[in-house]
Image (cartoon, rainbow, N blue to C red):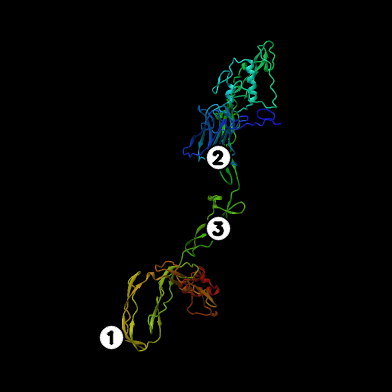
Amino acid sequence: QSIGCDDYLGSDKVIDKCGICGGDNTACKVVSGVFKHTLTNLGYHKIVEIPEGATKINITEMSKSNNYLALRSRSGRSIINGNWAIDRPGRYEGGGTMFTYKRPNEISSTAGESFLADGPTNEVLDVYMIHQQPNPGIHYEYIIPGDNVISPQLLAHRRPGEPLNGQLGMPESTNHEDEDLHRETDTLTGQSAGTFPVIQPGRFPSHQPENQVPAVQPPRQNREYNWKQIGKTECTTTCGKGSQYPVFHCVNRITHEEVSESYCDSSTKPIPEEEACNLFPCPAFWDIGEWSECSKTCGLGMQHRQILCRQMYANRTLTVQQYRCHHLEKPETTSTCQLKICSEWQIRTEWTSCSVPCGVGQRTRDVKCVSNLGDIVDDEECNMKLRPNDIENCDMGPCAKSWFLTEWSDRCSAECGDGVRTRSVVCMTNHVSSLPLEGCGNNRPSETTSCNNGPCAGKVEWFAGGWTQCSTECGSGTQQREVICVRKTEGNFDVLNPYDCSYLEKPPSQQSCYLKPCGSKWFHTEWSTCSKSCEGGFRVREVRCLSDDMTASTQCDPQLKPEEKEPCNTQDCIPEIDENCKDKYYNCNVVVQARLCVYTYYKTACCASCTRVANRQPGFLGRR
């Protein structure tokens, strides 16, 4: 059969949360909560007060942080992590109980710090948090006895006749029979080491279990025996102030022979009082803290730990000057660490072509951060200070200038006979640096060309001259022209009186004009020199879409874009001798070597040499 907590066979009694054998959890009170206040100032902040008599104490940080828990008595004595000194995890005595201080591994664990103690406490204790970062929450829990509960610690230290929670204990004058009765009563109650209800002296339980074996009555005490100190317990520590207690045995008063304690009066047995022992300080030692987290998430980093010189005294570990630990080799406070191999920069493409054919532009290349597994990851995974450039300037040399022209106008200025067509001409920098184009120079291309829509019949009509230029360069303006009455004949015309044309609608001699917002137009340079003088070559020109203010535009109709390349000199090559093509200077070979034949002056002055090289190396003039 099983044995209950009351030491009876067949009993089903168990200890409840209050530590009462067979209790119903009503003899104590569980106090718990979570401290979630937002703190702003760094330093010590009080969290909760642990009252005297508390048991099953649990103070736990809800998640890992850079904060620390601290414990101090109401008298101001620091128990754990006081005076800005962080203690190592371990067991620390305070408030009449032993506290276990836990701080999980800083790198691998996410759990927070904790204080644990069985209790009961014999004084009020205060729990603090050393605030350094946002509070993750502190859970606290402890058990306190109810109103009708006493502490077994108080019962163990009370003397006969002292009040016990308002109840008077056993008076010293109680006879031996009453003492035996009281001893038997205590045996039957079977209370555990926790708190328990007050037992009225001289009362039996209401009934005994059927299988209870009656207690054997000890022999009656007499004056022949008394208590004698025969020695002391072993000191609790080998150094740093421990404690020990005297040991009392029952002996014969005459022979001093040790006998069973039942021969002596237990009420007269002296209470062992604590005595200090081994008061000399313990040797100092290095207290090694936990390693901090690695300073780098990848690659070679550093980690640190706190090394303190400490000494044990009176069950407390004290921080002392470091010279006390000079007899010991000091452990390292820093160490290298590497959690994983860092990602690295990789150049995935070559440089692109320069963004401009001449002048200063930019070129780019593809640079990626690649992990040690070959995967492309975010740039933050690599060292940004070592990132290769993915864009740089490029200089393609000076740009040449060329004449840019529009197409000729579609309409002739005269409906019959001779007239003119017009076009726009502008000198601009060209970006096709490989074209054999000269500078704009003074030979401005013509803006007008003659046109003829056929002979005019001999008839009277209004003849309108060309419009003058617009009175404004942009916006609304006016244009003027002369309108006369004429009779056209073959080859000439006669001016008539305006009356002779009065039956005809007279064309307007003035009109509004609006130049700037008329839209973008295609402009192009003159054709370059043909790449070959015979048997089919090609010539090129640069074409641009320009707005009214002569800046680049994208508004031109792509279908109307002039050709940028066309074939030329498709005829067969026939050797020709030009009597006028001669070298005028003896050193024309220098002109050829300097590739100056692309310029008109040198091409004429050294005609024979330039022509000979052009026929020998087709396309030579096109490479500048």
Residue ID for mark 1: 499
In the displayed structure, 394 sits above or below 316; it is: below
Quadrant containing the N terminus is: top right
Is residue 527 visible in this depiction of the protein? no
Residue ID for mark 3: 366
When asked about the image quadrant of residue 57, the answer is top right
Given residues 463 and 247, the one toward you in this image is 247
Amino acid type of the residue that numbered disc 1 sits on in the rendered structure: Tyr
In the displayed structure, 181 sits above or below 573; it is: above
Amino acid type of the residue that numbered disc 2 sits on in the rendered structure: Met
Earlier sequence position, callout 2 versus callout 1: 2
When asked about the image quadrant of residue 550, the answer is bottom left
Quote the CA–CA distance across marks 2 and 1. Answer: 110 Å
Mark 3: give few (<14), some (14-19) or many (20+) Cα within 10 Å: some
**Residue 28 placed where, x, y %?**
56, 31
Secondary element under disc 1, as helix, strand or loop, is: helix
